Image (spheres, rainbow, N blue to C red):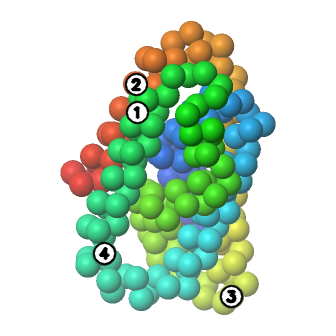
Amino acid sequence: MPVLSMLIYAFVASFTPGPNNIMSLMFANQYGFKRTVRFCLGVGTGFFALLLLSSYFNLLLKNYIPKIEFFMAIVGMVYMLYLAFIIIRSKGDSEDPNGGKYNSFVAGVFLQFVNPKAVLYALTVVSTFVLPYHTSNSSLLFYSVVLAVIGFMGTFSWSIFGSLFKKFLAKYRSQFNIVMALLLVYSAVSILVR
């Protein structure tokens, strides 16, 4: 098994901008690091579940990917555009009109199942690096845990960045929100343009 290749792929996919990381940065900046940990834990939990499901159903899904990929891309794109709208609309005070409901464990879990980057990553990492070499239940569980921990570390590091630069980002809140929303829009559009 090419473990180094898998780890490089996992780190690049987990630490580059995407809905998980952008939202955790935004939440940590707006609500603080401690209040964002629950979102990060939700992302890690949801990502673990997604990886485990991908491990067990990868062969079945692989046969249907051409049929569901476009639908998944549309759902993911719409959700990311919705998140971008929420960010643009944010006034930057610590209390938002939604009461921080998107900065929650459940929202973090749910995001994984509509996040095309996470879904496609789970499918590709499992089919390329895990299933050709390991098929036992313990192996699938082990690699799902390892990959979920790496994903959690990526999201968690972005929330640390958001909290460390809170004062700077508060000064430039509207510009920051615009940049974060544009990154989400870019991520959403790139799904269909690839």
**At 55% from the left edge and 61% from the top edge, which residue is drawn?**
110
Q: Residue furthest left?
A: 193
Badge 4 amino acid: Ile
Q: Which residue is mark 4?
A: 68
In this view, the residue in front, 167 or 7, is: 167
Which residue does the numbered mark 3 point to in the structure image? 137
Specify the farthest residue to the front. Answer: 97
- Secondary structure under tag 3 reads helix
Question: Is any atom of residue 135 visible in this view?
Answer: yes
Is 119 rendered above or below residue 181?
below
Q: CA distance from mark 1 to mark 4?
A: 27 Å
Amino acid, disc 3? Asn
Q: Which mark is residue 181?
A: 1
Structural crowding at the residue carrying mark 3, measured as other residues with C-alpha within 10 Å and reported as few (<14), some (14–19) or many (≥20):
few
Q: CA distance from mark 2 to mark 4?
A: 31 Å
* Residue contact between numbered discs 2 and 1, judged by CB atoms under 8 Å: yes
Q: Earlier in the sequence, mark 4 or mark 3?
A: 4
Q: How many neighbours does mark 2 have within 10 angstroms: few (below 14), some (14-19), or many (20 or more)?
A: some
The quarter of the displayed image where residue 181 is located: top left
Q: Is residue 9 above or below residue 131?
A: above
Of the numbered discs 1 and 4, the one sitting upstream in the chain is: 4
Q: Position of residue 116 (x, y in %)?
A: 40, 59
